[in-house]
Amino acid sequence: MPGSGPSPRSPRASAVCGALLGAGALALALWAYGSPDRGPAPPAAPPADPLPRTAVEVSPGACGRGWSRPRPGLQAFALHNTSGTAAEVRLQDARSGAVYGETEDVAPGTTRVLRARLGKGTYAFVCLHDDADAVTGPTVRIAEGGGSGPAAVPVTSRDLIPPALDYQRRIARRLDDLVARTAALRTAVDSGDRAAARRTWLAAHLAYARMGAAYGAFGAAADAVDRTTAGLPGGVHDRHFTGFHRIEYGLWHDTDAPGLRHAAHRLAADVRTLRETWRHTRMDPADLGRRAHEILEDTERFELTGRTDYGSGTGLATARANLDGTDEALDRLRPLLRTRYPGLPALDRSLARTRHTLDRQRRGGTWPPPARLPRARRERLAADIGDALERLASVAAVCDVRRAA
Amino acid sequence: MRRPAVTPLHRRGFLRGAAAGLGTAAGLGTAAAADVADRAPLTAVPFHGKHQAAVLTPPARATVLAALDVTAADRAELADLLRTLTRRARFLTDGGMPPPAGITAPPPDSGILGPRVPGEDAVRITLSAGASLFDDRYGLAPHAPRLLRTMPAFPDDDLDPAWCHGDLALQLCADNTDTVLHALRDLTRHTRGGMQIRWRLDGFTGPPRPTGTPRNLFGFKDGIANPDVRDARLMRRLVWTDTGGSHLVVRLIRMHVEFWDRVTLAEQERMLGRSRDTGAPLDGDHETDTPRYAHDPTGEVIPLDSHIRLAAPRTPDTDGQQLLRRSYSYDRGVDAGGNLDMGLLFCCYQRDPERQFAAVQKRLAGEPLADYVTPFGGGYFFTLPGVRDGADWYGRALLEGVSGP
């Protein structure tokens, strides 16, 4: 998978999104009552939905005030922040702490809508103002009603640090292996034995694909190791085209041997750098859930479409290795998911099925290029990976790091 | 003049001798019983009923036609797929608030129609099954609709296998493009593992220009003569099967518009048999006028080989061949030669595709119009009976009546 560009949920992208949302909220506030600081409560904007609506105050002193007439069913809460600091607001089960809905970044003076389906039970709002302790509002009891919407106890960074550390150690071991494999690749390329070099290349590339979960955390170092020609004006001849796919291009096309040797030496060096970087990097625990989801997103986008195929036709082997990489990240999260994600068994079945489908494509030790799969087999594979992705999306959502309340 | 006034030989037919092709666009202005009121906007189209309601509704402004292949592993999974499709289609047709997922999953709806899926101008959905669904995969062979066949290649067709057939055909219609795309995303998202899109063509209907029946991309009013959908007895005779289903024929017909635009108006009108300006048959003044072929036995006014005359001779023995046409225009960019790739997404419903569509198609063999169009894809499908109530689902009778593998 290519390491170029930030992953959709990289910290950088989130920061930008946050800034944009903030600006939007500010613009809305200006539109609503002229200035963010002036005036009492803003006139209510016309609701975007026909749901029963309850106005609820967000502030350290009066969190949850206004929810005086509890009712069951699908409903909306208009959360108005009367304080001077932005807040995150949660609606949770008063007993278990399972969260039915959250709204991040309710800016001072603004109103945000939170929708939830609530059944019989006890509930409370929690207001988490910036730089302040969480405040839990009054407990509200709904005496009757049907089932509530889905809820989960938030995952905090404390929950995620042990699995992330474990994961980091595993990746460190895999990097040792990768260093050895890319050194072997360098030797094989130097020897001029193309058949041996191709075999060594595949083994090394799959070793990399198996640690897929870590690519976002590697940053620019991963870019050099596994980039495509995207963004390179000179395409495959661009001098910045480096890494596995540059070598793949050289090994499966008749290109200049010195260039290929240079690329193999460079890759071995870059992977050693990667290992060094990894030793001194502390992986963001929040990355674990995202990676469990996004490895296969990359597989679907780049391997199944052949985008990352520079001649070897081994996209399905990469996909299979990516699946192992997904398992590796997911396994670390299992203890957290078991109580939070009822769809976990179905996800496991879906991943097992994808594994089985991929393994069946392998004939006589080789994998057909995805583009040459007969239609029915291609559709089956796309269906399996698509199904797994829909289920993995919840893993990332549930394992998003949330503040401890 | 490209075409002698009265001989049935047309340009390329003339040049190539008598090897003129058979069968083309039955959609370019066929059939009987004029019904412009057919276009009166319908209000709410109920989801439940004996038939799928969207069969009879007038063509909408926008459509998506997607042929899908089922990837379900067995009959139980196929039933799951059909139940899921029913559940989603019911929601999309009725509209409503998507249930909040809280912190457990990404938002359940794409949001492109706003926070609430509107029930007004809701999408109209039709689900049909192709002959391939009744192969040995799901043990459905003994239950195949009696008249369902795989679409044959008619002599003038230039079929691309990538654009033909499919286990299912899903048609989404609405007066706004975002509505149909919203539905497409919703339905595919919820069925990722169970089916995959095989091919897809989007279509549109222009507004009346300036009045009456909308025009196709040859500039002619298309679909003027359609049986009256308000006549229940006529619909039973022409459209519905005894089980409450119907047969859908889809033909993807490229229209060579550059070539067409280089043909004189007189020749164009003689090929169609109608006036381009008014849509009136060449022996009439208004589009609703019925051509009087008996007064013109030699084709002096409306040529014997004109499209409307071949397609619907208005004789007692062809009376039962009428089709309910539901065609759209399509536009999909540019071909390899630099010509505009646009044409007709021809759809028609009938009780018996052999007796109706194929009979008309065979009669159109060698019509002059054939030189200006190329059918390149499509398929024959059985439109499932309607979903009767909240407990029913698409194809239930079909699957529950089965005791196969």
Image: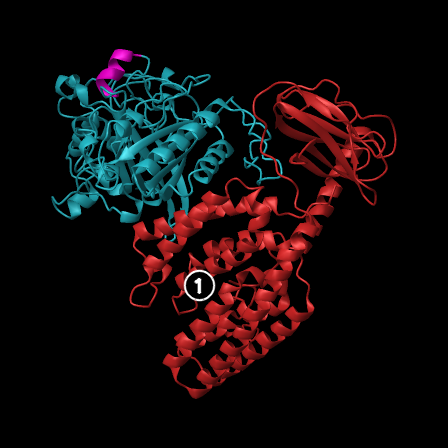
The reply, left or right, for residue A405 in relation to residue B177 is right
How dense is the environment of label 1, judged by Cα within 10 Å: few (below 14), some, or many (20 and up)?
many
Q: Secondary structure at mark 1?
A: helix
Task: Identify the residue at the far right of this view.
Answer: A38
Image quarter of residue A225? bottom right
- In the rendered image of the structure, the colour used to display chain B is cyan
The residue wearing badge 1 is A318
Q: Is residue B206 visible?
A: no
Q: Residue at x 47, y 75 (%)?
A: A247
Q: Residue B332 location in percent, x, y?
A: 41, 44
Q: Residue B391 location in percent, x, y?
A: 39, 21
Image quarter of residue B342? top left
Q: Is residue A67 visible?
A: yes
The reply, left or right, for residue A306 in relation to residue A364 is right
Q: Residue at x 43, y 65 (%)?
A: A309
Amino acid type, mark 1: Thr
Q: Which chain is red?
A: A
Tell which of A381 and A101 is nearer to you.
Answer: A101
Q: Residue A78 location in percent, x, y?
A: 72, 27
Task: Identify the residue at the far bottom of this view.
Answer: A191
The reply, left or right, for residue B315 in relation to residue A126 is left
Query: Is residue A27 shown in magenta?
Result: no
Q: Residue at x 48, y 81 (%)?
A: A184
Q: Is residue A226 above or below residue A180?
A: above
Tell which of B205 and B366 is nearer to you.
Answer: B205
Q: Residue A358 location in percent, x, y?
A: 37, 57
